[in-house]
Amino acid sequence: MKPMARVLGLCLLAALAFGAMGIRTYGAGSADGAGTTRAFLVGKADMGFHYGTFEADCPQGFELTLEESYLASLTPAQREWMLRPENAFEYGHAWKNEHLADAAGGNVCSNPKSFKDDPRRRPYRGVASAVSYGLNLDGTSDGRATPKTCAHQKFVGLNGEPVVDNQLYRASGCSKLNRGTGLQSEQYFERSFLIELRGVDDILNDAQVEVAVYSLADGESALKSATGSDVAYQTFTITANPRWRAQATARIVDGVVMSDPIPVMHLSRAGGFAAGRGNYAPGSPERNFVFAGEFELRDVRFRLTFQPDGSITGVMANYRPIDNIYLSEYAGGRGTASIANNDCAAEYNTLARFADAYPDPATGECTAISAAQNIAGVPAFVVQPK
C-alpha cells in the first residue's frame, strides 16, 4: 500500500471507530447533514466581577468580616480591653463562638435566616461602581419591577450591552472573601462542564443553532498543561443524569452566539466542598446529590464568541436562588465563620436585600439574584453515556 493511501485508510478507520463509540468529533457534520457540531470543555467560569479601581468600586473599603463586626459591636472601653495581649483567649472565644451564635446556639452560617433581625448583622454596603459584566436578563432599561422581578439598579454593560443585571456582583464585590482572594472570584464553579453547539452551518452568521450544556460524568476531570490550563481535544463522557443536561436554541450574528433563555439549569458540583453534605438522589443513575450536590441557575443565557485558536469565550448570565448560592456556607457552618472569618448572616441579608428575581408569592420578596460568569472553553470531544 502506498504511504498516502495507508494514511487515508488509517484516518478512515479512526473516524469509523469514533463513530462506533458515539464520540462527537469537533467540527463534524451531524448525522442528518444539518451543520456541524462543536464541543467545548468549560474550565473557567468566574464570578463576573469587574475589578476597576478599589476606590471607585468600594469607596468605603471592604465589608466587615465576622471579627470586625464583633469589634464594631463593642464600646471603646470593651474593645480596648479585648485587644490586650493578655486577653487573647477571651477575645478569640468571644468572636469565634459567642458572636457567631444566637440564643439557641445556632451559628450564623448554618442558620443565617435566624439572624435576619439581629442589629449586629448589618447588610453589606455593596459595590458603588456603575459598570459590570452580564446580560440584560429582565429586558428592561431601568430595572423597574416586572411580574418576575423586583425593582433594582442596572449596571452599564462591559460586554456589548448598554445595560446589564448582575446584583450578585453588587452584593459581594467588596467582600474580602470574594474580592480579596483570587481563587474565590476566578473560579466560581468547582467543576468543569461541557458546552455543545449543534447544527452550525456558518460560525459567522447562522439563524438557528442549538446550545447544549452538560455536566461531566461522575469521576471525570480534565488534564492540565504545565501552565495549569485545560488541554484541548480531550474526550469526556456526558453525565448520565438527565437533571444535569440542558439545551436551548440560539443564533450566530457576526461571529457571536446568542442563546435563548434556558428556564432552569442544574450543574453537578460533585467533588466540591458542599457535595458531601446532602442526601443521595433516589434512583439517580449516578452516585451524586440533588440539592447539596448541584448548582441551580434560572433563565440562563449565553453570549459566546469563537476565538482563532478554536476556543470560545463569553458570558453566561442567570439568576441564582439565594439558598442554592449558600450551600457551602450551610455545609461549612461554624467553621466557615470562625476560619474564613465570614459574617454569613450579614452576607445572607445582603443577598436578600439585592435579590431581583422570582418574588415569593406570600411576601413579595425576591428569592433569586442576577449573576454573570465570564467563561472560557477549549475544544473537546464528547461521548454519550452507556
Image: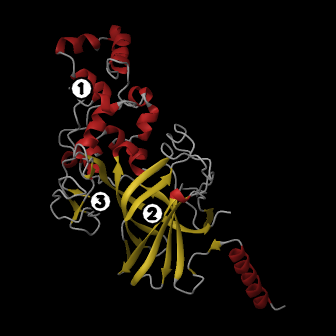
Q: Is residue 262 above or below residue 267?
A: below
Image quadrant assignment for residue 136: bottom left
| Rendered location of residue 57, percent (x, y) | 22, 48
Which mark is in front, 2 or 1? 1
Label 3 to label 1: alpha-carbon separation:
33 Å
Q: How is the image coloured?
A: secondary structure
Element type where label 1 sits in the image: loop
Quarter of the picture containing the C terminus is bottom right
The reply to whether callout 2 and callout 3 are in contact (CB within 8 Å) is no
- In the rendered view, does 58 fall on the left or right side of 16? left
- Residue to which mark 3 is pinned: 133
The kind of residue tagged 1 is Asp
Q: Is residue 310 visible?
A: no
Q: Residue at x 32, y 38 (%)?
A: 176
Most foreground residue, 159 or 51: 159
Label 2 to label 1: alpha-carbon separation:
41 Å
The kind of residue tagged 2 is Ala
Element type where label 3 sits in the image: loop
Label 2 to label 3: alpha-carbon separation:
14 Å
Q: Residue at x 20, y 26 (%)?
A: 119
Q: Is residue 120 visible?
A: yes
Q: Which mark is residue 118?
A: 1
The earlier-in-sequence mark between 2 and 3 is 3
- View extreme (top): residue: 86
- Residue to which mark 2 is pinned: 376
